[in-house]
Amino acid sequence: MKFLTTEKSLLDLILTKEPDLTYNVQDLGNFGTSDHKLICCNLDMCITVQKTSKTWYDYKNIDLDGTKSELGSIDWIEFSKGSVEECWSKFKNLLKDLQQKFVPVVKYKENKAPSLNYKAVKSVKRKHRIYGNIRIVITQPVN
């Protein structure tokens, strides 16, 4: 459906890859005292939200006292006996054990719509910021 969105021209467009996604496009009349008209349309779309959760070790909240105590209780001379590969394997396992014992795990859950990229999210936030400042005042005539 085409109609003028100002008094003289067609300025507003709905850009889509699939023309059948938009329907019921309507002219809602002028925007206040402006010559621009408001348009409204329905979008026929389905968005699947992927729920992802990430976990990582929070090293800024490590239990340093427990880690120091554990490392201080090790007989390093006895620990370092053996070949280089054996010592490295023991040391690596020790670090993994210390990590599991004394470093808290943080879990972050995120609901993300896969169709929105960085630029789209930025544009939506900008639109909310701009239109959040608009106040519509309806006055009634005094009798």
Image: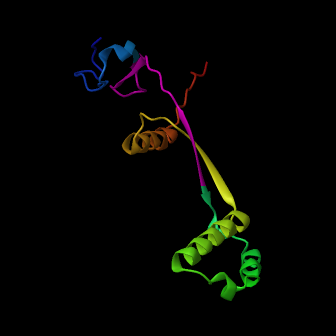
> Among all residues in the image, which is located at the extreme front?
82
Drawn side of residue 118 relative to residue 96, left or right: left
Q: Position of residue 45 (x, y in %)?
A: 44, 20
Quarter of the image that includes the N terminus: top left
Identify whether 4 is placed above or below 103: above
- The residue at the point 38 percent across, 12 percent down is 23
Quarter of the image that includes the C terminus: top right
What residue span does the magenta drawing correspond to?
Answer: 29-55
> Among all residues in the image, which is located at the extreme left?
9
Identify whether 136 is placed above or below 64: above
- The residue at the point 37 percent across, 44 percent down is 119
Q: Position of residue 139 (x, y in %)?
A: 56, 26
Identify whether 101 is placed above or below 37: below
Q: Position of residue 79 (x, y in %)?
A: 66, 81
Q: Position of residue 136 (x, y in %)?
A: 52, 32
Identify whether 71 is placed above or below 59: below
Front-most of 76 and 110?
76
Say which quarter of the image contains residue 118. top left
Front-most of 49 and 124?
49
Drawn side of residue 114 relative to residue 35, left or right: right
